[in-house]
Amino acid sequence: MAACNGASSGLARAFSRVEKRPNIITGSTDERYPADYVAAWALLYRRFKRSGIDRDAAQQALEDICAVAHRNFRYLRWHDERERYLRYPGSGTRFDVIERE
């Protein structure tokens, strides 16, 4: 599931209480400009189309989104054993854009 402001803790708490929940939630942790969401969702769905929808693809898409749109995007992945959503990137983590040689 991708949603504007979807990586806020309130949405994860709400889905944690129900039996049928999305495995992955992608979104920003704050309100963004529409252009940020347009870029983010284009990058996300392009990555999923090319690589499939899994943890690695979601993490790579998020790195792309943070480099292009804004650093306040996260993805939350449901963990069955812990019975909660895990956040990527973790607290205090940031992505740096570097030029390739």
Image (cartoon, rainbow, N blue to C red):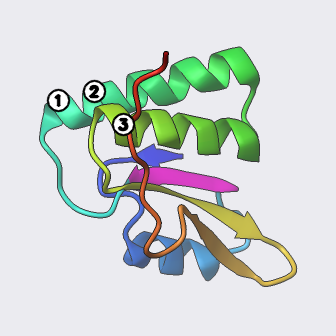
Q: Residue at x 60, y 37 (%)?
A: 60
Residue 64, magenta (yes or no): no
Q: Nearer the viewer, residue 55 or 17?
A: 55
Q: Residue at x 45, y 56 (%)?
A: 74
Whether pointer 3 and pointer 1 mark residues with C-beta atoms closer than 8 Å, the reply is no
Q: Nearer the viewer, mark 3 or mark 1?
A: 3
Q: Amino acid at mark 1?
A: Ala
Identify the mark at residue 38; answer none if there is no mark. Answer: 2
User: Image check: 72 left or right of 91?
Assistant: left
Q: Is residue 41 above or below residue 3?
A: above
Q: Is residue 13 above or below residue 87?
A: below
Q: Position of residue 70 (x, y in %)?
A: 27, 44
Q: Amino acid at mark 2?
A: Val
User: Image check: 92 left or right of 85?
Assistant: left
Q: CA distance from mark 3 to mark 1?
A: 14 Å
Decide: few, some or many residues near mark 3? Use Cα within 10 Å; few <14, some 14-19, many ≥20. Answer: some
Q: Is residue 4 above or below residue 37?
A: below
Report how many numbered discs are placed on residues in the image.
Answer: 3
Say which residue label 3 marks.
Answer: 67
What are the residue bounds of the magenta stretch?
23-27
Identify the mark at residue 25; answer none if there is no mark. Answer: none
* Secondary element at image label 3: helix
Q: Residue at x 27, y 27 (%)?
A: 38
